Image (cartoon, grey):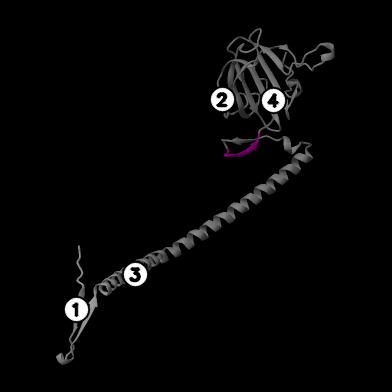
Amino acid sequence: MIRIPKQTKIMIMPMDSHLSKELILSRRLTIALFVTALALVALILFTLFSYATILQQAKLVPSMKNQLAEANTRLAKVEQINVEIENMRTMQEKLLGMLGVNPDSVAWVDDSETNGVIMAPPPDIWPVDGLVTKEFIVADRPNGILPHLGIDFTAPIGTSIVAAGKGVVQKAGFDEYLGNFVEIRHGFGYVTIYGHCRELTTRAGDHVNKGQMIGTLGGTGKSSAPHLHFEVWIDDQAVDPRTVIQDNDLQ
C-alpha cells in the first residue's frame, strides 16, 4: 500500500543555486495531482487505441465497398430475372386462355430432371391391368342411388399399380375407408387417388413419372374383396375417369 506523507516537498533548483525554490504540497494536493496524472495517461492510451482501431477499419473500407458493389450487381440481376419470370407467366396465362384453360387450375410441380418448373400433363393411362367391377356413379339419393366416385378394378393380389400420369405424391398412408392409398397431384388441376392397396412403394413428396409403380393391389380398408379403387378429380371435383383417360380397351 502506498503511503503518502502529510507534506511533500519539491525543490526547484535553476542554474543559479541562489534562486532555488521549495514547494510544499499537502497530501490532498499530492493525491489530486497523482489521480490527474493517471487520468491523463489513461486518456492518452484510450486515444491511441481508438486511433489504431479507426486506422484498421479504414483499411477495410475499400474491400467493403467492393463487396457492396458486387451485392448490388447480383441484386439487380435477381430483379431482372424476376421480371422475366413474371413476363413469362403473363405470356403463359394468355396462351392458356387462348386454349380455354383456366390458369388458376394449373398445378405446378418441381421437375428434378430439368431443375425447373413444369406443368405436368393430365393423367392418361389406367393404373392397373385388370377388369372393371364397378363404374363411376353419380348420386341420385331420391332414388336411393349412392355415389361411387371412381372405378374399381379387380386383379390378383400383389398386382402392380402405376401412376396414371406424371406428378407429385400429395398423400400416401392409411385411410379408414380407402385403406392404404396414394394421392397424386398432376398439372391443370388434376388429382388421382389409388385406394385399397396392399402395400405402398412411394411416399408423400415423391416425384413420380407416368407408369411408375406406386403400390400393389390389395383389400385394405373398407373392402369386400381385393381390388383397386381409382378416382380422378379436377379442380376439387370428382369426375368419371373414363372421360379423362381415353382407352377403349378397358373392360
Q: Which residue is mark 3?
A: 43
Q: Which residue is mark 2?
A: 203
Q: Which residue is mark 1?
A: 9
Q: Amino acid at mark 3?
A: Leu
At 55% from the left and 21% from the top, the residue drawn is 201
Secondary element at tag 4? loop
Residue sitting at the far front: 6
Q: Amino acid at mark 1?
A: Lys
Q: Which residue is mark 4?
A: 124
Give how far across and how far down residue 91 sits, in percent. 72, 46
Quarter of the figure with the N terminus: bottom left
Secondary element at tag 2? loop
Of the residues tagged 3 and 1, which is closer to the observer? 1
Q: Nearer the viewer, residue 141 or 205?
A: 141
Q: Is disc 4 in contact with disc 2, using a CB cutoff of under 8 Å?
A: no
Give how far across and how far down residue 198 sits, in percent. 58, 14
Of the residues tagged 4 and 3, which is closer to the observer? 3
* C-alpha span from label 4 to label 3: 83 Å
- State the count of labels: 4
Secondary element at tag 1? strand
Q: Amino acid at mark 4?
A: Asp
**Principal SS element in the magenta part?**
strand
Work out whether mark 4 precedes mark 2 in sequence or the reverse, and give the earlier one. Answer: 4
At 24% from the left and 72% from the top, the residue drawn is 27
Of the residues tagged 4 and 1, which is closer to the observer? 1
Q: Amino acid at mark 2?
A: Arg
